[in-house]
Amino acid sequence: MTTVKAGLDALERVKLAEVPTIAEIAAGCALGYLDFRYGDLKWRESHPKLAEWFAKYSQYPSMLETAPTAA
């Protein structure tokens, strides 16, 4: 979990592009996975810029179409 938190800290410091490149796709998928598997992590509270970016990014049709569903 230390590595995950360090990764979140690093993503909070970078400027993610509005038009996704492979870097933004990877970041978006990783954040989606955190939400799916570690919903209690509450990473948004300590990473507001990243949370704002992910809120927009997660509305892309490709993200909506591939979002995991609870089984």
Image (cartoon, rainbow, N blue to C red):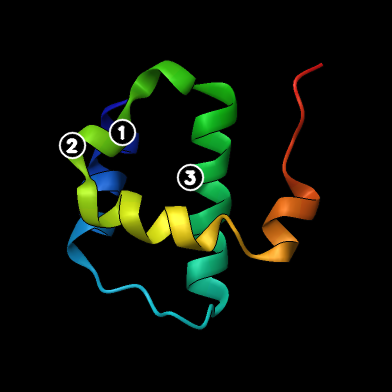
Q: How many marks?
A: 3
Q: Residue at x 49, y 33 (%)?
A: 34
Which mark is first along the chain, 3 or 1? 3
Quadrant including the C terminus: top right
State the image coordinates of residue 16 (x, y, percent, origin top left).
35, 73
Q: Position of residue 70 (x, y in %)?
A: 75, 20
Instruction: Tell me, for residue 69, which label it has, or none.
Output: none
Residue type at mark 1? Trp
- The one nearer the camera, 38 or 62, is 62
Q: Quadrant of the N terminus?
A: top left
Image height check: is 71 above or below 63?
A: above
Kind of residue indicated by mark 3: Leu
The residue tagged 1 is 43
Examine the image and state in which quarter residue 43 appears. top left
SS for callout 1: helix
Residue 10 in the image: state x and y as whole percent. Answer: 23, 55
Q: Nearer the viewer, residue 16 or 58?
A: 58
Left or right: residue 3 versus residue 35 is: left
Question: Is the residue 5 above or below the residue 23 in the image?
Answer: above
